[in-house]
Image (cartoon, rainbow, N blue to C red):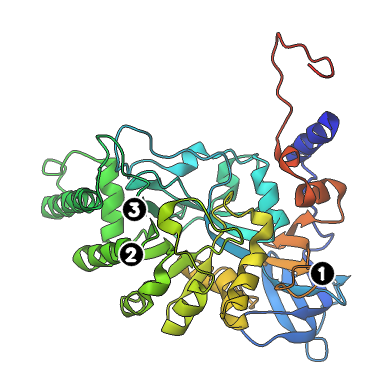
Amino acid sequence: MRLTVLFAAVWLCLPGAVVRADSDVVAFVGARVLPIAGDPIQDGVVVIRGGKIDAVGSRRTTTVPAEATTLDVSGKWIMPGLIDTHNHVGGIGGADSTGPIQPDVRVLDSINALDAGFRRVVAGGLTTINVMPGSGHLLSGQTVYLKMRKARTIEDLFILDADGKPTGGIKMANGTNSQRDKPFPGTRGKSAALVREQFVKAQEYREKIKRAAGDPEKMPARDLGLEALVDVLEKNRVVHFHTHRHDDIMTILRLVKEFDFRVVLHHVSEGWKVADEIAAASVPCSIILVDSPGGKLETVNLAFRTGAVLEKAGVKVAFHTDDWITDSRLFLRMAALGVRAGMSREGALKALTIHGAEILDLQDRTGTLEPGKDADLIVLSGDPLSVYTKVLETWVEGVKVFDRGDPTDHLHAVGGYGAGNDQTPYFCCFDHAEGQ
């Protein structure tokens, strides 16, 4: 077992670990294609060129380029790579115990790009993820959006904006998680008061910068935390807000109305109670549907029908794993549970793909199979909503990053905790004899 795990760890670092096609042009032929942007295509063709989607259509109407490496995927299904709007892989660490609001913290500074959790992610067909700090603070730091490319460092995974900066949001939370001893709040009322106080400070900081008009002598002292909150007020950074109870959801909607920032509601265990209010505020929701409900008292009213109720109310719904809450390898199950409880099939598939892309402001790059978008796709053994379906291959920007037929990838797809360990620990004075 130790040798197997060690082999898996070494594999992560090998230059050839990610399988590339022999050609810059690859054509998948014969699959049932779910482009998400349109109707399903029987006997479909998907052509990728230079890491982008080049063409999508039926075999009757779509020409396969002569120079393409053609992959026969007859009997399989192809859909866009899955997008997870809330994940915690990479050994993350955000804010600490020094205070309840820490917007200066960047979760990207704590991520181990070689963490084996990323192998679970691609084994589940996830190609884009929002990695977040935890929910034990009112504000635990800045999130980062990652593409599941081959990586040696975290920089290899960044999705950069037009200015070359890593994209991401900011993580906030309310409810019981952040209620503890000082300096943390002890009540829901105090929690909201502290958040308001910080946003007012950010407004004042922004006004000082405006009044300075570029004059360094008049500029306020630089404050990294307030800078991040100004980004929120300027709508350059979306707030990902952990919340469960309906009264906590309504508190967030009041804050949004008061300070005019963009927000995504995460979890919303009682979102079905206030679906009309969420819809009226035009706020999207990132939800989780666990097949074994339990845990915190404030999630006691979590319901499988949440996705259906929100969808029918007109709310944009995406799914997330909150990995480890739901293992990334089981992400497709989320949509199946949603449909079982009343979501439309179309809505559930969008909740795995394009709705997540829109929530992360990445809809121009990923989320559907359309010409010009990144070649992020997965090859499935069958219907994505079937419990029997397996992710066979995961491609990111035209590069195969997971192949279930590879023994090491298969181990990460089906193995337990041991398959996810990066290496066997070694202690200099420890007896390594078997059984010790």
Q: Say which amino acid is labelled 3.
A: Gly
Mark 3 residue crowding within 10 angstroms, few (<14) / some (14–19) / many (20+): many
* Image quarter of residue 11: top right
Q: Which residue is mark 1?
A: 381
Q: Residues within 10 Å of mark 1 (few under 14, many from 20)?
A: some
How many residues crowd around disc 2 within 10 Å: few (fewer than 14), some, or many (20 or more)?
A: many
Q: CA distance from mark 3 to mark 2?
A: 9 Å
The residue lying at 66 percent from left, 66 percent from top is 333
Farthest-out residue, bottom: 60
Of pointers 3 and 1, the one earlier in the residue sequence: 3
Distance Cα–Cα, label 2 vs label 1: 39 Å
Given the image, on which type of amino acid does mark 1 rest?
Ser
* Residue 363 in view of the camera: no
Residue drawn at x 66%, y 88% is 39
What residue is drawn where x is 69% and y is 58%?
124
Residue 105 drawn at (x, y percent): 38, 40
- Check disc 2 and report the residue beneath it: 249
Per the image, label 1 sits on a secondary structure element best described as loop
Q: Measured along the vertical axis of the image, is residue 413 above or below residue 125?
A: above
Q: How many circles with numbers are drawn on the protein?
A: 3
> Which of label 2 and label 1 is nearer to you?
2
Quadrant assignment for the C terminus? top right
Q: Secondary structure at mark 2?
A: helix
Q: Amino acid at mark 2?
A: Ile
Q: Position of residue 53 (x, y in %)?
A: 68, 73
Tell me residue 200's x, y (percent): 16, 53
Q: Nearer the viewer, mark 3 or mark 1?
A: 3
Q: Which is nearer the N-term, disc 3 or disc 2?
A: 3
Q: Is residue 255 visible?
A: yes
Q: What secondary structure is marked by label 3?
A: loop
Kindly identify which numbered label has been placed on residue 175: 3
